[in-house]
Amino acid sequence: MDFVSTRGTRDYRIEEVLTKGIADDGGLFIPTELPSFTYNDLSDTQSLQDMALRFLQPFFKSSLLEESLSEIVNEAFSFAIPTETISPGYSIMELFHGPTAAFKDVGARFLASCMSRLNAKQLRPLVVLVATSGDTGGAVAAAFNDLPNAKVVVLFPEGKVSKRQEKQLTCWGNNILSLSVKGTFDDCQKIVKELFIDDELQQHTSLTAINSINWARLMAQVVYYFWAYLQIDEQEINFIVPSGNFGNVFSANVAKRMGLPINQLHISTNQNDILHSSIKNGLMKKNVVTQTYSPSMDIQVSSNFERQLFESSGRDSKTINNIFHEFSKNNLYRFDKKIQHDLQSNYSTTAVSNDETLNAIKQIKQKYNYLADPHTSTGLYALLEKDANLPWVSLACAHPAKFGNAIEKATGEPPVLPKDLSKLFDKEEKMTILDNNKDILKSLILKNL
């Protein structure tokens, strides 16, 4: 399967897509075409692993990983992804049963399994560079912990993740370097993008991105949308996806284009509502990041949104280059009618305030006896407004125990901490506080190789 960059370069293979993370021109990878599936293609699958293998095989045909794909799938999809019906027409797909209790475990484990095999014969050390607003970094660190010939560098914004999230980012050692950056998640993400086009660093390492900007992460996430559909057993399905960096909901859109009969895709954001504004009003405007109870969504520049804009523009890389050139200069861009219409035909949106987030946690607990984390509750806030005659599935992104302060504030009681998380939080923290500077980080990476 061939891939192109949203910025114009072409003819990449899946091995390059996995290892590079970002294209040479700074764009994001996307397949030249997608395979298609019908219900009959997958209806007889007996397990999540079986379905994932069938779904992923076309992407890896004739690749170096084709013969290992079954092993990779079994390693990555090694925990349950159940869909729980809380009321007729209302269901919740729980994505937090992995080792770090967040949906990021799916993509991170899949990419780690791929990368460890691709890098096995490389002489240069693999450096995995990840910017995180909360859960991604912990999932990546867990997936790569103690893998040979691999170094993970985790950047997260100082003081802007929950205490339990920070513990998951810093409780490792060995091959995991945890860096607390004096800035926002957008600052961390900007540094990552700049380092990927740094020739000197690339000469000394095999540098890759494992954020949701890596296509492998999205590809793995597409799987569980098909899995939810098989569990719901309806002719059509609707999803509500809490969104920060746009990767998870774009995965749902990819699933729809591959044949999954999705009727509606609804995006829920928190007070940092650039996605809501971009889609509803056609105006992508960067504002100051507001700290909320749902820190993984405290983002102003949603990197994966570029992939959707690429599709909405008719795959016109010139338009994409122009959009982000103007946006980088002015911190805003107004879409033309064609792009805005396409965005609105693909997604509806809701922006949920801090108070509404807490109220949703409380209402869902009282009405359905279901406890949701703050990110999940932004989606459940939207779910409460939906017509129950249509099958709605809202995504549960993380275990509520990771956000104890918000849960206790909403319900009056602290959440129960699962045993696996409790063991993780008993470990010693190791981190370095870093100025918001690309050159300092570059020097630190070269020193730690």
Image (spheres, rainbow, N blue to C red):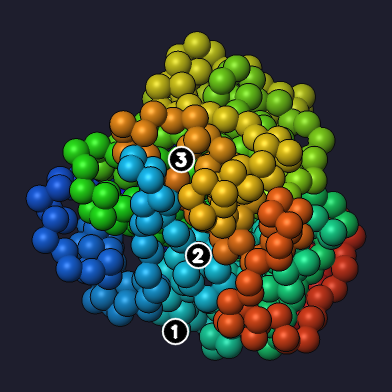
Q: Report crowding for label 3: few under 14, some 14 to 19, many 20 or more residues within 10 A (C-alpha).
A: many
Q: Amino acid at mark 1?
A: Lys
23 vs 273, nearest the viewer: 273
Measured Cα–Cα span from mark 1 to mark 3? 42 Å
Q: Report crowding for label 1: few under 14, some 14 to 19, many 20 or more residues within 10 A (C-alpha).
A: few
Secondary structure at badge 1 equals: loop
| Residue 127 x/y as whole percent | 62, 73
Quadrant holding the C terminus: bottom right
| Residue 269 x/y as whole percent | 61, 38
Measured Cα–Cα span from mark 1 to mark 2? 33 Å
3 and 2 marks in contact (CB < 8 Å): no
Q: Image check: 374 left or right of 156? A: left
The residue that label 1 is drawn on is: 121
1 and 2 marks in contact (CB < 8 Å): no
Mark toward the viewer: 1 or 2: 2
The residue that label 2 is drawn on is: 96
Q: Amino acid at mark 2?
A: Phe
Q: Image check: 44 left or right of 425? A: left
Q: Between disc 1 and disc 2, whose residue precedes?
A: 2
90 vs 334, nearest the viewer: 90
| Residue 17 x/y as whole percent | 44, 57
